[in-house]
Amino acid sequence: MKYLFFTAAAICAIAFKSFGQEAAPNVQTFNFTVEDCVNYAYEHQDSVVNAKLDIKSAEYKVKETTGIGLPQVTGTASFQDYLKIPTTLLPGEFFGQPAGTFVPIQFGVKYQSSFGVNANQILFDGSYLVGLKASKTYKELSIRSHIRSRIEANVNVTKAYYQVLVSNEQLRLLNANIAQLKQQMDETTQQNKQGFVEKIDVDRIVVQYNNLVTSRENTIRLLALNYQVLKFQMGMPIEYALSLKDKLEDIKLEDNTADLAADTAFYHNRIEYNLAETNVDLRQLDLKRQKSLSLPSLKANAAYTSSYQDNNFSNLYKMSFPSSYVGLTLNVPIFSGLQRVNQIRQSKIAVLKSQNDLENAKNGLKLQANQAHVTYVNGLQSLNNQKRNQTLAQEVLRVSKIKYQQGVGSSIEVTQAQTGLEDADNKYIQGLYDALVSKVDLDKAYGRIK
């Protein structure tokens, strides 16, 4: 049955994670409700933890962008030892030599050094102002991405939790059927010894009994794996001991979707739609940035430098020659070979595409919600039908046993009735899991999971 199988990625990840892990000397034990498991995942699941770190990184990104508009100060220091002082050729006429001749002259000293401080400050830059706003929107994007990670963790943990509950229910039904069949097998064996029934009647029951015992053993192993899948989805080490507080009867499965269908703007509650809105905002900001590149920019700058020169190193720093200045730098874009014009056009197209994506996301979310609604209603009806079939199968088996004991029925009827009950139990388990999963998908589709 499909509810017994999981994604290959989850199982492989569990296998790799468990391989090489040694049993902890002090294994921790937890007894959790589904809400406890979800809250644990919020704090330990890798994708949620990383998304939370992305928010912190985005905060630093905002501060980094803000720092661009603050004064930028740098210090400089230099030292030169001229092993050969540069030589300059001067016209010979300066020194009374014939025209056309040159006299080599060395200018400068052997040792030179300087220390300086430079500072500049943005007074106006349109791209900086837009970038500052964009960095804050980027932070908002990381926050919404974190919310999406929490929702996905919530969905995965809840489904894994329900899988364990369903597996426990399947194990309970198998135990009940095995106990019932064991009693029937013992009674039939005694009747065979007394000559009231044939050996073939005993053999039929033994075959059924062995099959049920094998199914129980398989279910027990799968149940252990289901617990590991749940712990993996929670971000919990799989060697920890985990037990579940919630019971299947605590979960309310009812058709309460009428109020959901009345909310036509539910998609605003979906994080996917919010992320698409943020993407539109970022594209619009990029368009503003491209336009701002056509505006002039103005910066203030200042510098102070202290120079030292001497032919003797021991006297180099005895006398300084300071210099300083303050000024303004104005950059005015004049012509860029139509690059900016075409960049603006590309940004406009990107905005239109993001708006189309937003509209498509809205339609997709509406369709997803309608599909989730239909699947949930169908799942409830199927589950209720399987419950009725299960009850009928139990009654058929009870009547078949009475008829067989009174000699008006055959062992084949009892065997068929037992097989029918097992089939009804299996379909009930499948319907139960499908209904639980569709309930989670419905809550997600209408933005109930935050």
Image (cartoon, rainbow, N blue to C red):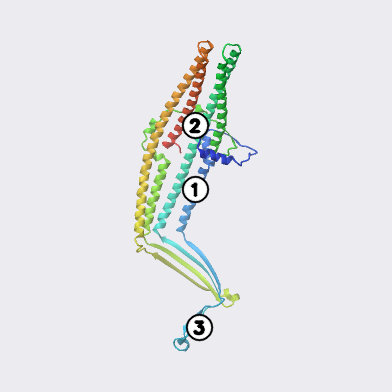
Amino acid type of the residue that numbered disc 2 sits on in the rendered structure: Tyr
Which numbered mark, 3 or 1, is in the foreground of this view?
3
Tell me, yes or no, if residue 306 can be seen here. Answer: yes
Please give the name of the residue rendered at 38% of the width and 55% of the height, measured from the top-left corner. 289
**Which label was assigned to residue 104?**
3
Q: Is residue 125 above or below residue 170?
A: below
Near mark 1 (Cα within 10 A), the count class, few <14, some 14-19 or many ≥20, is: some
Which numbered mark, 2 or 1, is in the foreground of this view?
2
Amino acid type of the residue that numbered disc 3 sits on in the rendered structure: Pro
Which numbered mark, 2 or 3, is in the foreground of this view?
2
Is label 2 in contact with label 3 (beta carbons under 8 Å)?
A: no
From mark 2 to mark 3, how far is it between C-alphas? 95 Å
Is label 2 in contact with label 1 (beta carbons under 8 Å)?
A: no
| Element at label 1 | helix
Q: Is residue 68 above or below residue 430?
A: below
Q: Would you name the residue on which mark 1 appears?
A: 54
Q: Furthest residue to the right?
A: 25
Amino acid type of the residue that numbered disc 1 sits on in the rendered structure: Asp
| Element at label 3 | strand
Please give the name of the residue rendered at 38% of the width and 34% of the height, measured from the top-left corner. 370
Q: Would you name the residue on which mark 2 appears?
A: 3
Quarter of the image for residue 369 reads top left
Tell me, yes or no, if residue 243 can be seen here. Answer: no
Please give the name of the residue rendered at 43% of the width and 29% of the height, measured from the top-left corner. 379
Find residue 58 and report its horizontal and vertical position in percent: 48, 50
